[in-house]
Amino acid sequence: MNMKQLATQAGFKQVMGSETTGYVFLSEMTDGRAGRRIYIRPELAPKFAALVSESRENFVLHQLLQLRALAGGLTSYSNQSDASEHKTQIGDVTVTYRISQELRDGMQPGVFISDVNGPLFGRGNLPGLYKVIRRGKNWQIEDQGNAPSSIDTTNASINGLADNLRQAAAETMPPMVENAYGQAGANQTQLYNEGFTHFYYPQSIKINDGEWKTPEQKQSNHQHCASKLARALVDAQNRSRKVQWTIHGAGSNLLKSALQQLQDKKLDQHEVMLMAPGPIVDLLPLMQRTGMNLHSDIMKYSEAEISVSKSRNTLWDASKIASQLRRFGRQHEQKADLIQHQVWKNGFIFVGKTLVNLATLGGSTIAQQALTLPNHGFRNSLASIGKVADNRVNPHLNPHLSRDEMNVQAAKQAGGLANSYKVTFKELIKKVRSA
């Protein structure tokens, strides 16, 4: 019996409410007598047949029945802009639904399944430490089922923007770690032989119909993540384990929260390189108080990035940051002076030009004019501000690259200059449509 036949027999044909509602009970078992009512669009039955093999049909239907109790729970993805909408991944099927607490088109409250699709991606992972090793020219996560309980490598990292653990640990962070602490020579050899430890910090993910809170985010809030990181910092310190941290984006916010729990601890075994960090004016005093060290370059942003965090750190809060850096020692005085010097040169002038370019673009010719803008600032700005989680085109995910290097990478890895714009626009259009 195929899925369509099974679904029909199970009750898909049983229309409830008015003929215009477009929903039926999933089965006679979901009519509200036990748990929530579950409704589904009857035209989805053929999609099930195409997505699920015959041997898995009973399993998937059984799991769908579990939504009576589990819909919107810890294992679901939840829309950040619509608390009633969720996605649950069941084997190779992703089910999208809304939970209604009120009468809807004459129908009683319940779970309304509106769509089914293939899998979103591999299941996520909880926050914490993961070992990342190099195999040939690629990086990969070592045995996810046996994550390390402590840091036993010289290098470690914390991610910011990322859709999942694999993207964060094996794609986004390795180039940054190599740039910060893996230059050609002994350091590179050590990094390649030893690998590095990654602290995974789950972020919300962007799917084609919005931004969604992941199951791993639900199971561990920000403070829980910070506590796990704090324990790892103290453990390495107690073992006199010197650790070189490469921390990206929102990872700096997590470090700040961890240090707020450890203000009376000494952490001088740790050194930090900040890659396109979030605002650091409140982080630096905490680092200085615990004795943490700063990389000689302190922080890096791609020249191509436009973001509020970059503006805060290099423009609005630059004078405060420069003053704080001088407290870390004479070795950082030159960098502090440079930050203040660049406020006007790379702050007002660069941001000002970008805003002018954005303001003068006409809607009908936006793509054509974007291709002619110098340094492809339009694409880079949109990818940065729009938080496009695609390493190929977002300079925020490539803080170690210059503007020219970023532009060359975007064109090469996206399959050409025009395609690099298409990738960016495609992601942003999805976001606009879901707003």
Image: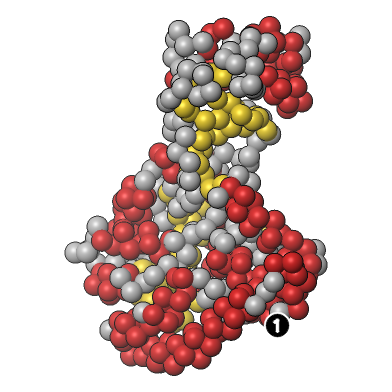
Residue under the point 33% across and 74% down: 281
372 or 148: nearer the viewer:
372
As drawn, the residue found furthest toward the left would be 264
Query: Quarter-wise, where is residue 132 in the image?
Result: bottom right
For mark 1, does the 10 Å Cα neighbourhood hold few (<14), some (14 to 19), or many (20 or more) residues?
few
Residue 217 against residue 279 in the figure, above or below:
above
Q: Position of residue 193 (x, y in %)?
A: 58, 62
Helix, strand or loop for disc 1: helix
Q: Give the side of residue 33 with respect to residue 50, left or right.
A: left
Q: Position of residue 425 (x, y in %)?
A: 69, 60
Residue 349 against residue 217 in the figure, above or below:
below
Residue where numbered disc 1 is placed? 374
On-image quarter of the N terminus: top right
Residue 85 against residue 297 in the figure, above or below:
above
Kindly identify the amino acid type of the residue bearing the numbered disc 1.
Answer: Pro
Query: Quarter-wise, where is residue 235 in the image?
Result: bottom left
Residue 36 against residue 50 in the figure, above or below:
above
Residue under the point 65% across and 35% down: 119
Q: Give the side of residue 418 with respect to residue 377, left or right.
A: right
| Colour logic | secondary structure
Q: Position of residue 136 (x, y in %)?
A: 70, 59
Tag count in the figure?
1
Residue under the point 43% across and 49% down: 128
Q: Give the side of residue 328 with respect to residue 137, left or right.
A: left
Residue under the point 66% across and 65% down: 393
258 or 42: nearer the viewer:
42
Q: Position of residue 262 (x, y in %)?
A: 24, 60
